[in-house]
Amino acid sequence: MPEHADLEIAANAPNDFLQVDAALCTRCGRCTMVCPMGIVAPAAPDVLPFVKNEDIERCLRCGHCEAFCPTQALALDFRLEERPVRPPEARALAPADLARHLKSRRSIRRFLPDPVPRETILEILNAARYAPSGTNQQPVQWRVAYESQAVRKIAALTVDWMRLRAQTADPLGQLLALLVANADRGFDVACLGAPHLLVAHVPADNPIAPVDAIIALTHVDILAPAYGLGTCWAGFVSAAAATHAPLQQELALPAGRKFAYALLLGRPQFKPRSIPRRNPLEVTWG
């Protein structure tokens, strides 16, 4: 199938929003059944699947119609340049291998100072574009503190926030005071010496977008070890970014965007060699 989908448009279709190859379409109806919005009109003997003009605005651009087509007969008229010439063959991951990968994932708290190539970070973030989001809004964008100096500045501002919070009735006050004492002795308690910090940010007026950011960050977290990289969820940076104005100014997010959460990224100084135990699984069946 050509990359830019020079497909035969459905007979009697009002538009070419859904481009269908008549030679490949079997009229099985699967595209109609999987569409979350129910806007793909079913095929008939003399009509291929199509989307009515009045329904185009309701399309989520999720691509279900395209992804689930068993013969790859159709293409949604959206970013066609990203459509591969030949869709990759579906390869099932061995469940045991994937489960072992997930169980082996560890938070890294000792990083090597070597920078990770920008191209590698972009490759990982590009994969995270495919993380699910509410109604496929894809609200997550990224701010990468790439230079070591920038990460150290964020770490210092986070310690400033800790110092202030330790003097209040914050339930974590005692812990924060201990962390500040460690910071004063030269230990990076906020960013753990990581060379990079990934910040996911979302539209300020979207109440569900922070969840989408966590899902995207989890994709990064799971994928990073495959590149020989380690991660750690930057909880103190994220807490400070919620209220500490100097840190917010340093992050300089675009107007209308808000901080969702951050992840430390770099090469681990030490690599995990075993899988520690966890609490027993608890499940309640309804």
Image (cartoon, rainbow, N blue to C red):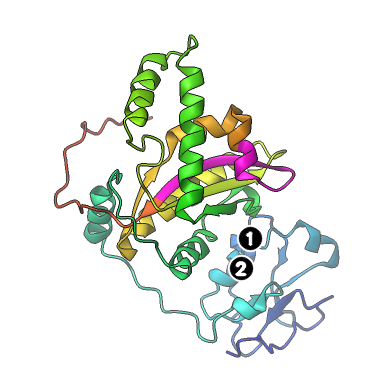
What residue type is disc 1 on?
A: Cys
Q: x%, y% of residue 157?
A: 52, 34
Q: Earlier in the sequence, mark 1 or mark 2?
A: 1
Magenta stretch: give its range: 248-264
Q: Is residue 252 above or below residue 127?
A: above
**Which residue is at a point 60% across and 90% down the rendered structure image?**
2
Say whether marks 1 and 2 touch (CB < 8 Å).
yes
Residue depicted at x 65% and y 45%: 252
Mark 2 lies on residue: 65
Task: Tell me residue 162's x, y (percent).
Answer: 46, 24
Image position, residue 112 (x, y; %): 30, 55
| Residue placed under numbered mark 1 in the picture | 35
Q: Residue at x 33, y 21 (%)?
A: 178
Residue 263 covered by magenta stretch: yes
Which amino acid lies under the numbered mark 2 shown in the image of this protein? Answer: Cys
Q: Is residue 242 visible?
A: yes
